[in-house]
Image (cartoon, helix red, strand yellow):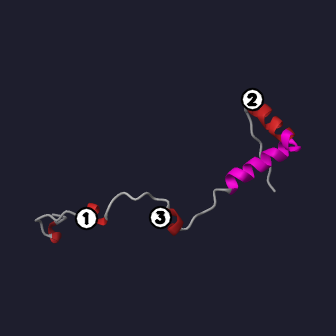
Amino acid sequence: MANLIVRNLEPEIIDALKQRAARHGRSAEMEHRIILREVLGALKKRSLAELLNTMPNVGLDADFARAQTSSRSDDVFN
């Protein structure tokens, strides 16, 4: 396993970590590992279907229909 060093933490954060660890009967280092696992472990990759299911309904397909113009399609780059 790798080591992680976190520098320049505010004293309030360190105190909160120590208090939380004490409430759970763990060392501050173990509490830190558990917090990281809880937060980062929840960031699992989702399938495209799961991602699409989280998108809000924004209208009907007709709302996004392409407006037809009078120009010909082969004139697009001229």
Q: Residue beneath label 3, please?
A: 52
Answer whether labels 2 and 3 touch (C-beta < 8 Å).
no
Position of residue 54 measured from the top left corner of the image (x, y, whole percent): 50, 60
Count of numbered circles on the image: 3
Position of residue 5 measured from the top left corner of the image (x, y, whole percent): 77, 42
Q: Residue beneath label 2, please?
A: 12
Q: Label 1 crowding class (10 Å Cα cut-off): few <14, some 14-19, many 20+?
A: few
Classify the position of the C terminus by image quarter: bottom left
Q: Secondary structure at mark 1?
A: loop
- At label 1, the amino acid type is Ala
| Membership of 20 in magenta stretch | no
How far, Cα to Cα, is label 1 from label 3?
20 Å
In the picture, the disc for residue 20 is: none
For marks 2 and 1, the one nearer the N-term is 2
Position of residue 16 measured from the top left corner of the image (x, y, whole percent): 77, 34
- At label 3, the amino acid type is Leu
The region drawn magenta spans 23-41
Query: Image check: 62 left or right of 20?
Result: left
Classify the position of the N terminus by image quarter: bottom right
In the picture, the disc for residue 65 is: 1
For marks 1 and 3, the one nearer the N-term is 3
Q: Tell me the quarter of the picture where residue 25 sits.
A: top right
| Membership of 24 in magenta stretch | yes
Q: Residue at x 27, y 61 (%)?
A: 63
How far, Cα to Cα, is label 2 from label 1?
54 Å
Magenta segment main secondary structure: helix
- Residue lying furthest left: 70
Q: Is residue 1 or residue 28 the one in the foreground?
A: 28
Q: Nearer the observer, disc 2 or disc 3?
A: 3
- At label 2, the amino acid type is Glu
Q: Secondary structure at mark 2?
A: helix
